[in-house]
Amino acid sequence: MRIYHAKDYADMSRKAANIVSAQVIMKPNCVLGLATGSTPIGLYKQLVEWFKKGDLDFSEVMTVNLDEYKGLSRENDQSYYYFMHQNLFDQVNIPVENTHLPNGMEPDSQKECKRYTELIQSLGGVDLQLLGIGHNGHIGFNEPGESFDKQVHCVDLTESTIEANKRFFASADDVPKQAYTMGIKTIMQAKKILIIASGEDKAEIVHKAFFGPITPQVPASVLQLHNDVTLVADEAALSSL
Ligand code: F6R
C-alpha cells in the first residue's frame, strides 16, 4: 500500500484528483468506480476545474458508483444519483449513458443486485475504485460484521445510520431504511483502489484499518489484502499513525 501524506483537505483533494486524472489520461476509456460523501467533493471539484481548462477529457470514461439508497428517486436531492450529477457528471463531458449507479427505485432487490453485478462485469471490471471511509471502518454501505465475500447486495441501514441521516430529511420516516451497495468482494475485484480520508475524526479508524488486524469488524481492513491500494490522507487523518 502506498500512503500519500497531504497537508490539508485541499491538498488531499488535489493529490487524489491527480491519481484519477492520470488514470483517465493513461486509459481514456477506463471504468472509474466512484463514491459519494463529503470527502470526495473537493476531488470532484478539482477534476471539473481541470476539465474546464481543457486538461481532461471524459468523453470515453465509464463510471459505476458504489452505492445508492433504496427507495429514493433520482430527483431526490439526497440520492447519490443527484449528488453525482451535481458534483461531477453535469459539469464534465461524460455521456450520461456511460454513468451508472444502482437503481434505487427498483423494488426487487435480487433483480437489481444481479443487474448491477452483471453490468460491472460487462464493462470489464473497475480500473480504479475511489473509496471514502466511515468512522466505523465501513466502505460503501458495508458495515462492521459484513462478510468479505459479497457482491452487490441490499443492506438494512443500522439505527445509528438512520439517526445520523435524519437531519437531511423532513422526518425520520422519510429516511431510507435500505441501500444497494457493491459488496466487499466487488470492491476487492477493482484493479486499483484509491481511498481518501480527511480530518482528525478519521485518524483512529485510518490507523485501525491499515495497521490493525484484518477483520470484518473493520471492513476497510480487507484492503490490506489488495495488491494496489493508495491511501491519500491529510495530516489530521494520519495523526494516529
Ligand atoms: C459513499 C460511501 C460511504 C462513504 C463514507 C465516508 O458512497 O460509500 O462509504 O465513503 O461514509 O463518508 P464521508 O466522506 O462523508 O466521511
Image (spheres, helix red, strand yellow):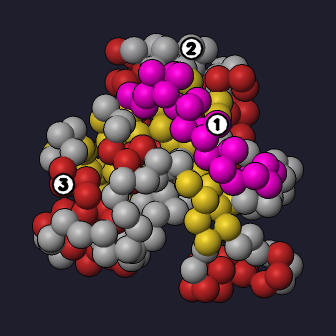
Q: Is residue 187 in the magenta section?
A: no
Q: Is residue 112 in the magenta section?
A: yes
Q: Is residue 153 left or right of residue 107?
A: left
From the Cβ of disc 3, is ligand 1 less than 8 Å away?
no
Query: Which residue corresponds to mark 2?
Result: 60
Q: Which mark is residue 224?
A: 3
* Marks 2 and 1, how far apart at CA: 22 Å
Depth order, front residue of 25/169: 169
Q: Which mark is residue 115?
A: 1
Give the residue at x 19% y 66%: 214
Q: Which residues are magenta?
A: 104-127
| Residue type at numbered disc 1 | Arg
- On the question of residue 223 being in view, the answer is yes
* Marks 2 and 3, how far apart at CA: 31 Å
Q: Residues within 10 Å of mark 3 (few under 14, many from 20)?
A: some
Q: Earlier in the sequence, mark 2 or mark 1?
A: 2
Quarter in which the C terminus is drawn: bottom left
Depth order, front residue of 175/108: 108
